[in-house]
Image (cartoon, helix red, strand yellow):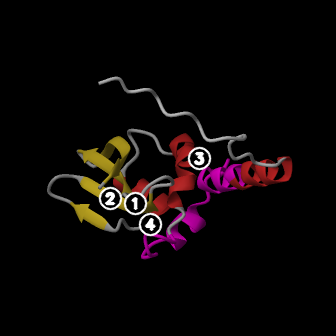
Amino acid sequence: MDMEPSAPPPGPGPRLHAPACALLLALTFSLSACAMEHSSSFDSDAWKSQRGAAASDNRRGGMLPALDKVLHTGMTRDEVVKLLGEPEHSDTQAGIDQYELGIAGYGVDEEYYELRYRDGKLESHRMGRR
């Protein structure tokens, strides 16, 4: 049985006009900029003010690049708490504190910042998702 491919429909396909393309590009870039908003310097008070914020309203995630410049291994837990405030979750037996970061910029996962201590000093810190 011979099957010939069907012919394409007559006339040109759908086209976007230049103003529509420009609007679409502007909208895409503005949404991308919102999701990638980062602070160049760390603001301890702004970080602390996000404690207890709803995941959709929490703005800590944008502060991570600046936080990484001021948070370093070897700091005591007291120094970290002075900088970041009390963590939302803490397991003193395991030496782990977690701070909520809100919802990931391009997803529905919630992000958190985990700090691990050994002998009362910061050993490591990382962002995680759940």
Q: Amino acid at mark 3?
A: Ala
Which badge, 4 or 2, is on the more N-terminal residue?
4
Quadrant showing the N terminus: top left
Q: CA distance from mark 4 to mark 3?
A: 16 Å
Q: Residue at 53% across / 48% down in the picture?
A: 67
Quarter of the image that includes the C terminus? bottom left
Inspect the magenta stretch and tell me whether residue 33 lies in it.
yes
Q: Earlier in the sequence, mark 2 or mark 1?
A: 2
Q: Amino acid at mark 2?
A: Gln
Indicate which label's residue lies in the foreground, 4 or 3. 3
Give the residue at mark 3.
66
Mark 4 → mark 2, Cα distance in angstroms? 11 Å
Q: Which residue is disc 4 drawn over?
A: 85
Residue in the image at 46% along x and 28% along y: 5
The residue where tag 1 is placed is 108
Question: CA–CA distance between discs 4 and 1?
Answer: 26 Å
Circle nearer the viewer, 4 or 2: 2
